[in-house]
Image (tube, rainbow, N blue to C red):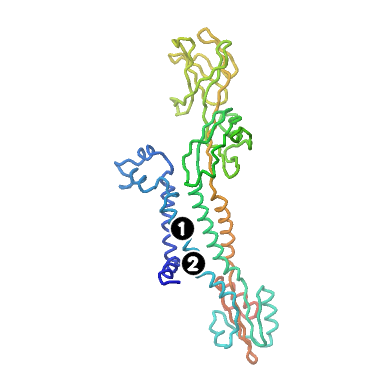
Amino acid sequence: MRAWQREVVSLLANLKFAIALLLLIAIFSILGTVIEQGQTVEFYKANYPLQPALFGFLTYERILAWGLDRVYSTWWFLTLLLLFGASLISCTIYRQIPLLKVARRWFFVQKPQTILKLPYAVTVPASRWSEVMGALEKRGYRLWQTDNQFYASKGLVGRLGPIVVHASIVLILIGAIGGALGGVTAQAMIPSGETAAVTNITQAGMFSKRWLPQDWRIRVNRFWIAYSEKGKIEQFYSDLSILDREGKELDRQTISVNHPLRFRGVTFYQASWDISKLRFQFNRSPILELPLSPLEAASGGQKVWGTWLPTKPDLSEGISVIVPDLQGTVLIFAPQGELLHTTRVGETVEVNGIKLKLVEVVGATGLQIKADPGVPIVYTGFALLMVGVVMSYISYSQVWGLCQGDILYVGGKTNRAHVAFHQELNSILAVPSNIE
């Protein structure tokens, strides 16, 4: 390895460098949480104006220029993740693996003075040699011995723990990078009974096309809301079908909040809802449709929907129809604002000399569609991380023994849980404890 290569590896494997990278990643992750991600330019102009600037410097121009509106997919954030991953790999190869190799080696101690310098050291009668060997073996120690020497160790898996932790974090970083480059997020508002393509993509990585097939269509077979006895919304439901280019149904499921549809790596979430249109009849006319527009109610800011229905062919007269929710109640108002009727879907009322039948209030489901190829990798990494953390808590303990004359010198050391280790050896050797 050349000199400059050794310097690069030494820098990457340096603990202080890794901590600095981790601190930078944490800072930018906090910024990505505080600053809304993936919004429109108008949103940032409204919330982060030039004057007065937030904190004296944070304006929409700087947010857009520095990529703070999409922190997790910027080149500099991905570079930090790559450097941190390289640091972990370098530390694993050049520090942790050599430590593991050293831990696997066993050797005997030749001098009593060497044993007496260990953190734990006692002397017992040499006649207890077999008794000590058996006690160590019962406590899970692996033994190597000669006629007058022995070496025992246990907990080698604890030395493997840091390597597993590093590998798991690298997996999480790979998953995060894969999600940033290949992930895609889209939104769709589809009326009940209609079919639509996924076109409103709000966020997409450079390799996202392969994860969200462009020939899929979403059919909303039915959208409905479950209300409580007091009229409060309890849950939203959408009966969805995924269709291919020819209209063949690939999958069908009913989703609700916190119960999404997952199909071929793409997840469909129940995110919002709307009321899209009103179906009605005049006398014996065919069923007609008019779109409903969201309105702001005067009291309490409650959202309602409304439209204007002409009651004469020349549009000289008409009525206003207000729909407060999907429970079927409809309010009909005169042009002057007078309430004419409170009716329900399916009923017929007479307005301006004609019979008006409200056939259906059509709701629309708001879907959030996500595809992230990095999610399985991240989940695997987190599972491995938990295993590695548990492994790291296992103490690696070593015990040496040397018999000279009538004296058996026994000493040992461990990398953690020193008090418990001393108490264990005191129990094995049946000597008074010197740990208070």
Quadrant in the picture for residue 40: top left
x and y percentages locating residue 233 in the rendered image: 56, 32
x and y percentages locating residue 133 in the rendered image: 68, 80
Is residue 57 something that shows in the picture? yes
Q: Nearer the viewer, mark 1 or mark 2?
A: 1
Q: Quadrant of the N terminus?
A: bottom left
Compared across the picture, whether 2 is left or right of 330 comes to left
Tag 2: residue type? Cys
Q: Quadrant of the C terminus?
A: bottom right
Q: Nearer the viewer, residue 404 or 371?
A: 371
Residue furthest to the top in view is 353
Compared across the picture, whether 392 is left or right of 55 comes to right
Q: Nearer the viewer, residue 118 or 380?
A: 380
Checking the image for residue 91, the label placed there is 2
Q: Is residue 371 above or below residue 2?
A: above
* Residue at 58 percent of width and 56 percent of height: 383
Label 1 neighbour load within 10 Å: few <14, some 14-19, many 20+: some
* Residue at 36 percent of width and 37 percent of height: 46
x and y percentages locating residue 192 in the rendered image: 57, 28
The residue under label 1 is 82
Inter-mark Cα distance, 1 to 2: 14 Å
